[in-house]
Amino acid sequence: MNIPLIESWLDAYPTQIDFSIPDTNVVALAFNRRGNHLAGAAANGAVIVWDVDMWSVLRLLHGHAASVTSLSWSRSGRYLVSGGQDWRCIVWDMSTGEAVHTFDFDVPVTNVSIHPFKSHLLVASLQSSPPVLIDTRTRTTTPLPAAIPPEFRDQARDVDVLACWDATGHYIFTGTSKGHWHVLPLADVTTPVFTDRLAAHAIRHFAFARSGSHLAATVNDKTIRTYHLPYVAGYLTDRARVAAQVARGDGGEEVPVPPFECVPMLKLQDLVNRNSWCSSAWAGNEEFVIGATAGRMHELNVWNVATGTLVKLLEGPSEPLLAFAWHPVLPVCVSLSQKGTMYVWNTKPRDRWSAFAPDFKEIEDNVEYEEREDEFDLVEELTLPTVNGGAVSAAAKVTKPAFVDLVTPIEGYTKVDEDDDGDEPWALTVSLDHPVGGAPHSAMGVFAATQPPAALVLVQRDDPPARGKRRRED
C-alpha cells in the first residue's frame, strides 16, 4: 500500500456501510499490520483469511474443535495466531496454510497477542487463570501470576486476565475482571512496573494507536479511558536509527529499554444512552477514538480526542454488534452482527472531475456561462516553428516522460512501524483457483465452507474434562 498516494482529503473515519457479507459464522476479526488481509475467527473452529482489495477468501484453516475466540498477526504478516474455546493455541504459517505450532492448555484461551518484533514470543490469556508467556522456539510456557493483584491470587479462578504487548515489545499490559491494570516488563515478569485500578468493573479491551504512543482501555463501567505513552516514540525512533545503521553495514548499538511512562488523557462515555462498549480503536492519525457499542444497538461513536466531544454517531442495522476491527491505514472498519453478517464501513465516495480535466473547477451554485468572442471561431492550422531553417523533428516534439521511482523508500514513510519482525519480507499470494485449505474463492456463503472436518468435531458433554486431560472422539 502506497501511503503517499492516499488522498489527504478523505474523511478520517467511515461514514456509511459500503457492503455486507452474510452468513460468515465469524465471531472475531483482526487486520494484519498493512491492512491488506483480514482474518476472521469462526464459531465452528475455522479461521478465514480475506483479501481486503477483492474480498475473496485466501485461506481457510481448520485446527480448532470449538469456537475461535481471538486472532493476532505477526508484523510481517506471515504468521497468524489463534486461540479458542477448545483450550488450544495454534500458530499458522500463511505461506503454506499449515499449523506450525500447537499449544494445549487446561482452560479455554480468551485472547492471544504476538510480540510486535519477535514472532516467536506470544502471550495467551486464559479463562480463570493467569496469562501465559509462550516461546515457540523453545516450546516453553511461563505463567504470569504477577498479572493478578496479590489480594486475589488465592482466588485466581474468580479472576479473568486480558494480556497483550505494547508497541515496543518490552512490556506486557494486563487488565483483570476486577478492574486492575498491571504492566509487566519482559525482562522480569514477576515484578510489575505499573499498577492501577481503573474501576470496579472488568477491563474488556486494550486498543493501541498505530504509532503505539496512545492507548484506549475499554472498561465495563461504560467508559473508554485514553492514555498517552511518551516512552514509545523515542524508543521506536532509536530502533529505526539502529536498524538503518545495521542495513548500511555500520553496526549498531543495542537500544536500551525505555522506562515506562503513562499520562491519563480522557474518559469517554455516552452521556445520553449510557451505552456499554465492547471495544475501541484509534482513527484519523490518532485524532479520533471509535467506540463500538455492546448490547442491542449496532452503533459506532466517534470522539475528537482534542476536545473530548462526540463528533459522529454511525448507526448500523437493527442487529446487536458483536465485534469490530479497524483498518490500520484507511478510514475503513468492519463490524460483526450476532447474526453472522459482516458489515464493511467506508467513506462516502466523492467525484473528482479534476482528475479528467485539470482546469475543471467545482462551484457551489449554478452560474451563467459567458461565451468568449473567439471561442468557436475557426482557427487555421498553425505551422510548426523551424530549427535551422527546417521543420522541428518528431523526436523534438515528444516531451520526455517523467521518471517515477517505485523502489527507493520515501523518507518519512519508511518507519520501524513498517519493518518486519525478523522474517524476510513476505506477502500472501492470491490464488485464482482455490485458496489453501480448499475454500471457495468467493467471500459469499462462507458458512457452508467453514464446516470443520469430522475428526475435529467436539464431543458434546455435560461436564468439562478433568484438568490436564482431554477426552477425544474415537
Image (cartoon, rainbow, N blue to C red):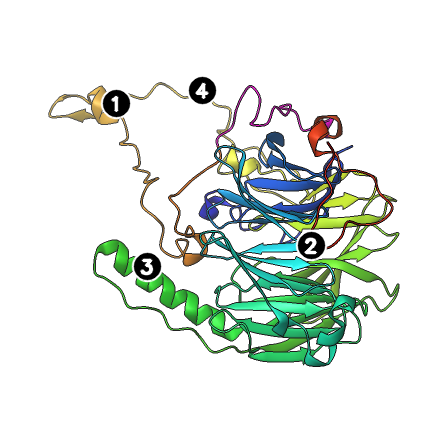
Q: Quadrant of residue 285?
A: bottom right
Which of the two labelled residues, at mark 2 and mark 3, occupies the earlier sequence position? 2
- Mark pair 1, 2: CA separation: 85 Å
Q: Nearer the viewer, mark 1 or mark 2?
A: 2
- For the residues carrying marks 1 and 3, which lies nearer the camera in this image? 3
* Amino acid type at mark 3: Ala
Q: CA distance from mark 4 to mark 1?
A: 18 Å
Amino acid carrying label 1: it is Leu
Instruction: Specify whether residue 437 is painted magenta.
Output: yes
Residue 333 visible here: no
Residue occupying the point 60% across, 57% down: 284
Tell me how far mark 3 sits from mark 4, CA to CA: 65 Å
| SS majority, magenta | loop
* Camera-nearest label, 4 or 1: 1
Point out which mark residue 296 bears.
Answer: none
Q: Distance of mark 1 from mark 3, alpha carbons?
A: 56 Å
Labelled disc at residue 243: 3
Question: Is the C-beta separation of discs 1 and 2 under 8 Å?
Answer: no
- Badge 1: how crowded within 10 Å, few (<14), some, or many (20+)? few
- Judge depth for marks 2 and 3 and give the one in front: 2
Residue located beneath label 4 in the image: 378
Residue at the spot of label 1: 384
Of the image marks 1 and 2, the number of the one nearer the N terminus:
2
Q: Which residues are magenta?
A: 429-446
Question: Can you say whether 414 is above or below 232 in the image?
Answer: above
Q: Is residue 237 visible?
A: yes
Reply yes or no: does residue 9 show up in magenta: no
Of circles 4 and 2, the one toward us is 2
**Mark 4: secondary structure:** loop
Mark 4 residue crowding within 10 angstroms, few (<14) / some (14–19) / many (20+) = few
Amino acid, disc 4? Leu
